[in-house]
Image (spheres, rainbow, N blue to C red):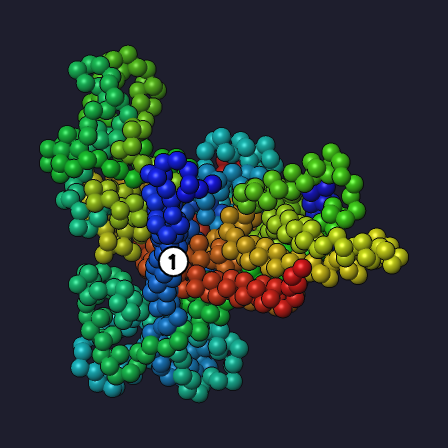
Amino acid sequence: MTDATHEGAKRHRSLLTVDAQTKKRNAAEARFKVYGMVAILAGLTFLVVLAVSIIRSGLPAFSANMVQVELTLSQEQYAEAEGQLFKTRAYADIFNAAFTAELRERGLTTEFDPESIERIIGQPGATIRSFYRANEDQLGQPVTFNLPTASRIDGYFKGRLLRENVTDSRFLTLADLDLADELKEAGIIQSQFNWTFITGKDSSVDNPGGAGLGASVIGSFAMMLVVLFLSLPIGVAASIYLEEFAPKNRITDLIEVNISNLAAVPSIVFGILGLAVFIQFAHLPQSAPLVGGLVLTLMTLPTIIISTRASLKSVPPSIRDAALGVGASKMQAVFHHVLPLAMPGILTGTIIGLAQALGETAPLLLIGMVGFVAREYPDGLVSAFMDPNSAMPAQIYTWAARSDDAFYEKAWGGIIILLVFLLAMNLLAILLRRRFERRW
Amino acid sequence: MSKLTITTSAAAILALTAGAAVARDNVQIAGSSTVLPYASIVAELFGDNTDFPTPVVESGGSSSGLARFCEGVGENTIDIANASRAIREREIETCAANGVTDIIEVRIGYDGIVFASQIDGPAFTAFTPSDWFLALAENIVVDGAIVANPNITWADVNADLPAVEIAAFIPGTKHGTREVFEENVLLQGCEDTGQMAAMMEAGLSEDDAEAACMAVRTDGKSVDIDGDYTETLARIDANTNGIGVFGLAFYENNTDKLKVATMGGVAPSTATIASGDYPVSRPLFFYIKKAHIGVIPGLKEYAQFFMADEIAGPNGPLANYGLVSDPELAEVQATIENETVMGGGM
């Protein structure tokens, strides 16, 4: 291209000197590198900001300020409380009276009236009632209870609620805060790891201290089981047929286009379909993880079919040819040779599909899994699938919509737990791929 | 085969599970997001205090709750619809057409609608219905001619109000709160300012004038919030000049972020609402499908528990959360006890 002997010496080019055009090209390359780095840096910044804000807002949900108090409930008190309509209120009254008496005996410096105690302690009634109902032999003996403080007191100790923002109201007065401070100093109120948040069920707006994610984790798990056991066999069977056996013609082309389209359908559409088909037509129970699982199966199927077909395609034809060459039938070639080699890809696709389904809220909205769903833990396999339950993302959504800051904090905490599950699933996908992957 | 696969697989699953479909043992509730906190408090207490499972309470708005309520009778429909307004004639007709004929109406109590803004924002401390009508109406009458609302700042409306741009966040049309807002604030303001009379003079019929009074401007000064109050709060947080419409209970739980304005000179509180002095309050309801009583375990018990003196009375947890309890609680209790349906039938 460049020859030095050609007429004009002006146009002489040397490999050793950099001419304008080369400079320009080099500059373009350098610029592109910078663009790339900026893009990555921007992405990383967003990731860090997101992670920091989630952790900062969510970590407080994992601790709780608890009150440790010893209570002795007599047989008569138990019988009287059980005889009322509003039993938990009766237990709370007994508890508050006992606690007030104990504090009076200790001789606190802060003057307080019994109503302060009521505002500092959250909702102790349900915990105490369920304990004594299960352990009637403990009546008459001292039992130490570990009870959450009211959400405003908890928020005060966590810095969510500032003293200067408190005006005396029926929910909280400044005198309550003085008393709470003294109790904290005396070690009666202690900050502990919040097990209720991990193991509990949803609670009403009035009782943020009792709210937990545990029941909805079970709900999510039941749904994932349904999704796994339906979408994996159906998805794999469909893709093997389409990829290996089906003739290539207009109909299969049409099906292929439709699967790709289905993968892009907004998830809420599957929710509407689920409501119409599973609940209104098939009369399956509302708010049940079974129905949630079925709806999410519909949503996950296209993802699994597409990834399975891709991994079947990536198995070299030479494997099939060799198997057929030594006399294997088409089915033997597929099941003995192609499928095992495609398995890592199929599993990865399935796990990614499941992770996607795990984080899905929109379709659950329509089948009644979003709302106040606070059932006890399911007492068996059937009840785990058929009884109303929530799911992790649905629970987080519900909490975020409540007026109390304490629930907002729990929503962030729930996001952390959900992310841990998602990271674990993605890690599993990566490990499986690493372990079984073969390069050709 | 995608669609075929999916439908056949769905059919197979249904065939498998249809036989196993167990009877529902929990009460299923849906409806107003204003009633939701109260309903969830009662649902939790009901689960804690009785041997029945905790009912499931869904949100979504009064209209969508009543629409689901009227879908029909049977285990796959909801048992109770929560509503922040009374059921409409049209909805009763829909219900009847779908076989839901016997409906028990239960009035839970009253809720106040308050007008609140950012605690550090401009000094919105006193409003009248007239201010809100002039600020939010789509058209108003100026010199005998109906023109598009020219008011841009609150000071244009009333010289006593801060001179900041109008930015109101009001409940969307599917909320029961909207109806109360339209009737007790906009229509009231329309009449107070003499605008309604002026509109009729300008040639509108009475019905048209009334509709024009309640038409809200669509130029972005007023924003419909279709979600719940948390969304309104978020909008107010982001907009110093914003004013939102909230329930009294929600406001009382967020006094550190919001400041409330008086309406017509009366400050909202449970006392002024119970006495009827505060002009913008509305009754809250839930509706029970009578056909489900005795079929769904715990349905009647839930309603009885909800309206018991200990729960819905003036010293109960609902009043503590912000509900103004019904002075005629005993009558409501009798309605549930006798399963008295609407329209006088049995």
Residue A158, compared with residue B75, is above or below; it is below
**Viewer-nearest residue: A346 or B319:** A346
Looking at the rendered structure, the kind of residue marked 1 is Leu
The image shows a total of numbered marks equal to 1
Location of residue A209 by image quarter: bottom left
How far from the left and from the top, in percent, is residue B182?
Answer: 32, 32
**Viewer-nearest residue: B39 or B300:** B39
Q: Residue at x 17, y 47 (%)?
A: B121
**Viewer-nearest residue: A321 or A46:** A321
Horizontal arrangement in the rendering, residue B146 relative to residue B180 (left or right): left
Quadrant of the snapshot with the C terminus of chain B? top right
**Viewer-nearest residue: A46 or B325:** A46
Q: SS for tag 1?
A: helix
- Residue A95 in view (yes/no): no
Q: Residue at x 37, y 72 (%)?
A: A63
Callout 1: chain: A
Residue A381, compared with residue B95, is above or below; it is below
Q: Residue at x 46, y 70 (%)?
A: A198
How far from the left and from the top, in percent, is residue A13?
Answer: 38, 44
Query: On the image, numbered disc 1 is attached to which residue?
Result: A44
Quadrant of the snapshot with the N terminus of chain B? top right
- Residue B157 in view (yes/no): yes
Q: Give the farthest residue toward the right.
A: A327
Q: Residue at x 44, y 71 (%)?
A: A196
How far from the left and from the top, in percent, is residue A32?
Answer: 38, 48
Location of residue A389 by image quarter: bottom right
Q: Residues within 10 Å of mark 1 (few under 14, many from 20)?
A: few
How far from the left and from the top, in percent, is residue A330?
Answer: 84, 52
Horizontal arrangement in the rendering, residue B169 relative to residue A198 (left or right): left
